[in-house]
Amino acid sequence: MTGYDLSDDEKDNYGSLDYRNIPRIQLGPYEFDTWFGNSSVFTTNVPDSLGYKEIASNNKKSTSTKKLMDFIDNKRPWLDKLFFCSTCFKYTDNEEDMKMHLNCCRYRDAPPGKIMYYDTENDYIIRKVKGSQHALLCQCLCILAKFYLDNKSVFYNLDYYDFYIIYRTVNGTQTPMGFYSRELLSWEPNNLSCILVIPCYQKQHLGTKLIEFSYQLSNYEQKISGPERPLSPFGKITYLHYWSKRLARLLLYGSLSETKILTLEIICNTTGFRMDDVLQTLTYMGILFVKGEKSAYIDYYKEAYKTRDTDIYLEDGRFNVIILKAKVEEWANHNRPINGAPILDKEKLILY
């Protein structure tokens, strides 16, 4: 190390990046922008040297905090582009090296892990890949994810994580397009730690399918569960939209559509959602009418009114609220398609 001293400002922000230090990613034939910075692939304090190259050559480069801070202060790119394998996610800054690797990647013909969902009709496969058994693939996948998840912090110690990777066929090859990870030793009842659909494969509802699968797995384990908190801004939007569609489908077409009086426990047991998530979603949808909020609705809590087809009464020891079916229908009409069709075919789940 040099004798360069960090200022108080630099100490506060040391190790963090507020800009995209690698502007572009190439994944197989696709090239696209990064969203966030990522220093995890570099040698410490050497912003223009990939760490794996130093290890492979056994040639340690001199480090310089001053050089690093010069890159950061001037927002200089550490690399112009990083190349990732589209099946195993190994990476390099050398295009020719990546071309050679793509011709012999062992995962092109034999994807890793155990099949947990197999839908040949719609071309979806979800595989469980253990971090303890396929460490390098999972590490590289997390490194790619860091470019798109600002709060991603775990890259290497993955022995106690399972990864659920969704595949579709591209040019005859099963190609991973997104994943979620799940911590096995969590103190909280979480069924998902982080989730990513790779940008070039987005707008295919793959994230929704992965979230639905996470709840199907929790249901198989007989657990009420949900994602790890805090959610990223994108994660919060995705989950609220998923929870809302699930609740709207249940209330309009599903097993709760004929129910006049509900409890939070019934909703939680039916959906597998945590109570806080249910309440947050009902509020987000704008379909609740709280007792006493307007005088016109106060009398609706009398027993004589609880057979009305227009309302669902949500009763709990702490509160009483009305779910207005007209508001549910209004929300559904603005967020089509909402119908009785499931997101995943339960017959195609392989959960054992």
Image (cartoon, grey):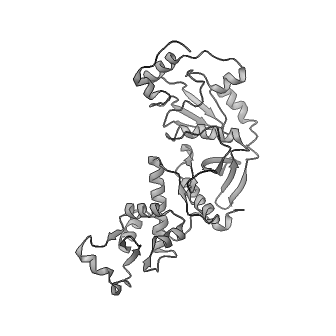
Q: Is residue 86 visible?
A: no
Q: Residue furthest left?
A: 295
Q: Quadrant of the C terminus?
A: bottom right
Q: Position of residue 19 (x, y in %)?
A: 45, 30
Q: Position of residue 187 (x, y in %)?
A: 57, 52
Q: Position of residue 167 (x, y in %)?
A: 65, 51
- The image shows residue 319, relative to residue 4, as above or below, that is below
Q: Residue furthest bottom?
A: 304
Q: Where is residue 325, by image quadrant? A: bottom left
Residue placed at 50% from the left, 73% from the top? 266
Residue placed at 40% from the left, 75% from the top? 315
Residue placed at 55% from the left, 60% from the top? 225
Q: Is residue 202 visible?
A: yes
- Return the residue nearer the eye: 56 or 26: 56
- The image shows residue 190, relative to residue 158, as above or below, that is below
- Return the residue nearer the eye: 159 or 57: 159
